[in-house]
Image: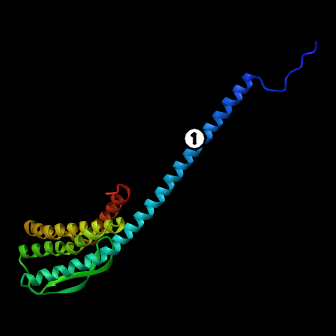
Amino acid sequence: MVRVHSLLPSESEVSVMGFHARAIDKSQRHLSEVQRKVNRWMSGMQDRMRNMAEAVALSYVLCLGTLAMHEVAHLVVLYAMGGTGALLIVPWRLGSMNHYIYGLHVEPSQPLTVANQALLNFLGPVLATVPLGFLLYFVRDRIPRISLISNILILVFFALLESSYELLESALNRDIGILGSPEFNIGVPILIILFTAYRGVWKKV
């Protein structure tokens, strides 16, 4: 008797084929999900990097105006204290190299006492925070808010720095060059801008 083999798969073969098909389908769905997550992560990183670059650029541009405004505020405070003076453009020597940069500086017509000079140095930056705080109250877009916050922090830094080194130099009877150096006065604001932009974009503070 001749036995004829069926060309159709047996039940066990069908079961194995179905298992492999389900495994392949599951693997494909898993890979698709991983790919979607990677794409979302890459898209999120690109958005954050772009937002941080925008925040840093806007903060730096605003900082140039903020520093000028804080020097004008020094002049306003000086006249409010009964003194007189002028807003000058003065050279500022970089300590690490023989190179000069230029900036605004208020020069009183008459020498001030240490207390009055410290008060002048403190109130100038504090007064300049008022318009920035007013804008911060109304602005809701995240990038401009980050820029305003960073510049308010920079003004707070200058208020503390400029008043404290005047008092420290008087108390110690010596020049504290590092506190008045361009590297320190420019480097710290740049760090404030970078840190605030990072916190604002990555931490969404």
List the residue tagged with mark 1: 30
Residue 185 appears anywhere in the view: no
| Label 1 residue SS | helix
List x then y, in percent, for residue 2: 93, 15
Of 17 and 126, which appears nearest the observer?
17
Residue drawn at x 32%, y 60% is 195
Side of 98 relative to 88 (left or right): right
What residue type is disc 1 on? His
Residue drawn at x 59%, y 45% is 32
Of 1 and 70, which appears nearest the observer?
1
- The image quadrant where one finds the N terminus is top right
Residue ranking furthest to the top: 1
Residue drawn at x 26%, y 76% is 67
User: Mark 1: few, some, or many residues within 10 Å (few <14, many ≥20)?
Assistant: few
Q: Quadrant of residue 122?
A: bottom left
Figure check: 194 above or below 70: above
Residue ranking furthest to the right: 1
Q: Quadrant of residue 78?
A: bottom left
Residue drawn at x 37%, y 59% is 201
List x then y, in percent, for residue 73: 18, 79
